């Protein structure tokens, strides 16, 4: 192998390796206020599979990485990179859980849920 090829291989190994993808998924999942069980259900995989991915024991397929990224509200690239400045969630954990429940619903369903929540809040304020 030439020195140029060695340098290329070395650079590829350090730039965007999936080695830390599990840790990154865990970090994003926790920031979103999701449990492993919640994210596993939303992505259609077993809890144990997600656990193995988060412990870097299993590398997810591209299709699974896309599903996970979509449910976490990030780009697939974000699963492979640690941001320079970690974003702090401004949501309380209970708000993040609520958002995770409605994230996959269409706009009409979210509107219906919003109306229901408004009625509940109004009733609670009266009592």
Image (cartoon, rainbow, N blue to C red):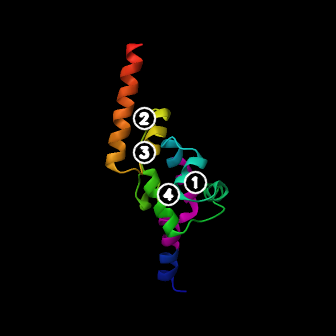
Q: Is residue 16 magenta?
A: yes
The local secondary structure at tag 1 comes to: helix
Q: Earlier in the sequence, mark 3 or mark 1?
A: 1
Q: Is the stretch drawn in magenta largely helix, strand or loop?
A: helix
Find residue 125 and report its horizontal and vertical position in percent: 38, 16
Residue at (67% x, 56% y) in the render: 48
| For residue 107, side relative to residue 96 (left or right) | left
Of 110 and 5, the residue lying toward us: 110
**In 3D space, how far apart are the residues under numbered discs 1 and 4 (Cα atoms)?**
9 Å
The relative height of residue 3 versus residue 114 in the rendered view (above or below) is below
Residue 40 is tagged as 1
| For residue 52, side relative to residue 81 (left or right) | right
**In 3D space, how far apart are the residues under numbered discs 3 and 4 (Cα atoms)?**
16 Å
The local secondary structure at tag 4 comes to: helix
Find residue 17 and report its horizontal and vertical position in percent: 52, 66
Residue 91 is tagged as 2
């Amino acid at each position: 192998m030439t020195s140029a090829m060695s340098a290329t291989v070395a650079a590829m190994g350090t730039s965007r390796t999936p080695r830390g993808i599990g840790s990154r998924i865990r970090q994003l999942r926790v920031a979103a206020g999701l449990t492993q069980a919640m994210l596993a259900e939303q992505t259609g995989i077993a809890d144990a599979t997600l656990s193995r991915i988060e412990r870097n024991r299993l590398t997810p397929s591209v299709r699974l990485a896309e599903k996970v990224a979509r449910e976490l509200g990030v780009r697939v690239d974000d699963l492979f990179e640690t941001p320079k400045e970690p974003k702090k969630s401004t949501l309380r954990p209970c708000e993040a859980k609520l958002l995770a429940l409605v994230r996959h619903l269409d706009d009409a369903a979210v509107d219906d849920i919003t109306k229901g929540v408004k009625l509940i809040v109004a009733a609670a304020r009266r009592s």
